Amino acid sequence: MDNGTMYIKANSLFDRIDPLSKLAWGTVMMLWTFYVAVPEIQVVIFFCMLVIGRFGAKVGVFKLIKSVRTFLVLGVFMIIFQTLVAKGNTVIWTAGSLTATAEGLSAGLNVGLRLIVIVTISSILAFTTDPRRLVVTLIDHAHVPYKLAYAVYSTLRYIPLMRHDANIILEAQTIRGARLSKSLLARMKQYLFLLIPLISDGIRQATTSAIALDSRAFGFRETRTNLLKVDIPVIGPAIVLITLALFILYIVFGPRAQISLLY
């Protein structure tokens, strides 16, 4: 990792693509995931992301799954919640006032798998994109104001730091005799106790960064120069165009999106 981020330098295909093209590719894939309304296709997209992460980004499958394991639990919870709440005509299970329907299960699988796929795409981008190169690309090529670009960099930098702080807190609790229960509800309750120290630490880090920026007169000038220069090779836009073409073909010939609420 580099400078507290998830970025890992590797001689991979994604490492040779400019950050702006990777951002555009990730956006197209997320839109594709939002459009899909068939759980089986969501599963196919998820495994495709694992293959792309392994061979295109040189990120191990288990490492990629480990980076999204928290959202895997959240995805399972959303699947169960949607199955029990969404309305439908085909009842597959009932217990008292709780009723699970096939339509609710399909909607829950769509929502849960969509979340997991989106987080997986985000992890691939985070592992293969240097935040500093991303900021320079946004400023030089996308003409984004550098203040906004720095806000993007700060977000990408603080999320891994907060995850690192959460691991430290969990290790400290383990040293003091606390152990994570195997029960899903108990684990969720224990994770809630992490919120207060994480929020307070995040506020303290934000205050420190704000003081450092003010002391360096950040934002005094309308423009700024960069020592780092980032080019956009042809391979990046080519991959984006190929992905966009496949998405359009899916829209034309694939199953139609069923964007509806089953409540």
Image: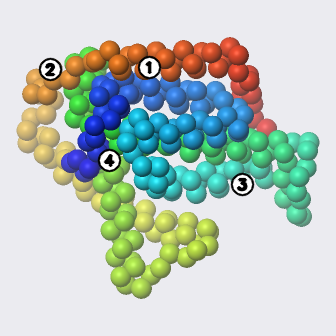
Q: Earlier in the sequence, mark 4 or mark 3?
A: 4
Q: Secondary structure at mark 3?
A: helix
Category of crowding for the residue at label 4, using alpha-carbon neighbours closer than 10 angstroms: few (below 14), some (14–19), many (at least 20): many
Nearest to the eye among marks 2 and 4: give it.
Answer: 4
Q: Given the image, on which type of amino acid does mark 3 rest?
A: Ile
Q: CA distance from mark 2 to mark 3?
A: 50 Å
Label 3 vs 1, first from the N-terminus: 3
Residue underneath mark 2: 223
Q: On screen, 241 above or below 228?
A: above
Within 10 Å of the Cα at label 1, are there few (<14), some (14-19), or many (20+) other Cα atoms?
A: many
Q: Is residue 78 above or below residue 20?
A: below
Q: Is residue 226 left or right of 80 when viewed as pictured?
A: left
Identify the residue position indicated by label 4 in the image: 6
**Residue at the spot x=33%, y=68% of the render?**
168
The disc labelled 4 sits on which kind of residue?
Answer: Met
Q: Read off the residue under disc 3.
A: 80
Of residue 180 and residue 198, the one placed in the foreground of this image is 180
CA neighbours of label 3 inside 10 A, class few (<14), some (14 to 19), many (20+): some
Structural distance between the alpha carbons of marks 3 and 1: 35 Å
> Which one is earlier in the sequence, the residue at label 2 or at label 3?
3
Numbered disc 2: secondary structure: loop
Q: Earlier in the sequence, mark 1 or mark 4?
A: 4
Element at label 4: loop
**Residue 143 x, y percent position in the rendering:** 27, 17
- Front disc: 4 or 3: 4
Evaluate if marks 4 and 3 touch, with contact meaning CB atoms under 8 Å apart.
no
Give left or right: position of 97 versus 193. right
